Amino acid sequence: MAAIPVIVKIRAAAEPLYKRSLLIWEKALGPEHPKVATSLENYAKLLRKTERHAEAEELEARGKAIRARHAEKNP
């Protein structure tokens, strides 16, 4: 049980890195690129692990929409 506070701190420290990564991908490749979708999905996983399910769902939905649009353009 002593490891739980450490895990919480690591996840809290990771969140700004996920946000920064997402911003970098969006700026470099555009907001509709599949790598942006991957970044959104990874960030959503972190949010789910921190019990922030509503925020995670929004990111997952955005990532899914990007992938769907990309699949339509590139069958």
Image (tube, rainbow, N blue to C red):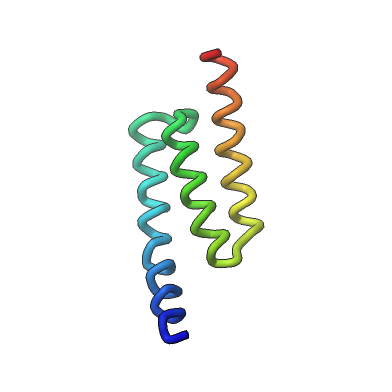
To which quarter of the image does residue 51 belong?
bottom right
Q: Is residue 19 left or right of residue 68?
A: left
> Residue shown at 61%/32% (left/top)?
65
Q: Is residue 45 left or right of residue 11?
A: right
- Residue 6 pos. (x, y %): 39, 78
Q: Nearer the viewer, residue 20 or 42?
A: 42
- Residue 22 pos. (x, y %): 41, 45
Relative vertical location of residue 44 with respect to residue 3 in this rendering, above or below: above
Q: Residue furthest front?
A: 1
> Residue shown at 60%/55% (left/top)?
55
User: Which quadrant is home to the C terminus?
Assistant: top right
Relative vertical location of residue 72 with respect to residue 2 in this rendering, above or below: above
Q: Residue furthest bottom?
A: 2
Q: Nearer the viewer, residue 27 or 11?
A: 11
- Residue 57 pos. (x, y %): 64, 50
Relative vertical location of residue 53 with respect to residue 34 in this rendering, above or below: below
> Residue shown at 48%/52% (left/top)?
43
To which quarter of the image does residue 60 belong?
top right
The image shows a total of numbered marks equal to 0
Relative vertical location of residue 15 with respect to residue 33 in this rendering, above or below: below
- Residue 12 pos. (x, y %): 43, 69
To which quarter of the image does residue 67 belong?
top right
> Residue shown at 37%/29% (left/top)?
29
